[in-house]
Image (tube, rainbow, N blue to C red):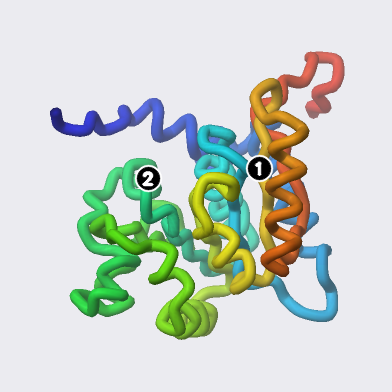
Amino acid sequence: MRNKLPSIYQTARKMAVHTDPRSVVAEQYRSIRTNINFARTEAKIKTILVTSALKEEGKSTTACNMAIAFTEEGKKVLLVDADMRRPTVHFTFLQNGKVGLSSLFMGTATISEAISETRIAGLDVLPCGPLPSNPAELLGSSRMDQLIEELKKQYDVVLFDSPPLLSVTDSRILANKCDGTILVVRAGISEQVTTARARDSLHSSKGNLLGVVLNNYRLSKDRVYGH
């Protein structure tokens, strides 16, 4: 059975910062961006990993909206789909995703061929590409180190969407290579014990945990500030 592509409505809902810029949700993503900018003053944070403890906690949606929020500052941003097991970035941006990160490892494409522009000014994406059989080995390789350095020269901010921390080792490998990590938890779904295990796994991999994003939390109307 063919995979069903998401509708335009579903895609728009995932990019709230772009499609509904005056919403409370969009403003919260801008707050996260501001907190990251102030997180470390002695050195710029250019590479950011976005992950979660388990699947379906909102990491991909968070990575997408944070990427858009950084473009609003006039920055050149790249969103990398490093979830080489269940990639979704190409769906969000309505691309075929046949060429991407894995193509760079296989040598079947150059960086410029693998990266695609989006309709959002300043935002490019690097889809996953064909699913490899050994994603952890690829992400942990010296070639990945070289790619990160090359991408840092071309972009102000590089965000990595990655698999859940407690499912596979991929995110722990990337956390060690990135300047900082954002851990996404979902209100009403994520459990304290799994979130704590995810935090501990980041520490054991010597990842720099910048903070935790609480996703899908519903504010009461009297707590929403408008003007």
Front-lying residue, 196 or 98: 196
As shown in the figure, which amino acid type bears the numbered disc 2?
Answer: Arg
User: Residue at coordinates 31% horizontally, 31% vertically from top-left?
Assistant: 6
**Which mark is first along the chain, 2 or 1?**
2
In the image, residue 205 lies at what x, y percent?
Answer: 67, 66
Residue 86: assigned label: 2
Q: Identify the image quadrant of residue 139.
A: bottom left
User: Residue at coordinates 72% horizontally, 40% vertically from top-left?
Assistant: 195
In the image, residue 42 lies at what x, y percent?
Answer: 84, 80
Q: Which image quadrant: the N terminus?
A: top left
SS for tag 2? loop
Residue 219: assigned label: none
Q: What whole-number distance in Å separates the C-alpha atoms at marks 1 and 2?
A: 17 Å
As shown in the figure, which amino acid type bears the numbered disc 1?
Answer: Val
User: Residue at coordinates 84% horizontally, 74% vertically from top-left?
Assistant: 41
Judge the density around disc 2: few (<14), some (14-19), many (≥20) Cα neighbours within 10 Å: few
Q: Identify the image quadrant of residue 135.
A: bottom left
Position of 118 with respect to 204 (left or right) is: left
Q: Is residue 33 above or below residue 153?
A: above
Front-lying residue, 45 or 172: 172
For this orientation, the residue located farthest to the top is 221
For this orientation, the residue located farthest to the left is 1
Front-lying residue, 28 or 137: 137
In the image, residue 212 lies at what x, y percent?
Answer: 75, 46
Q: On the image, numbered disc 1 is attached to which residue?
A: 184
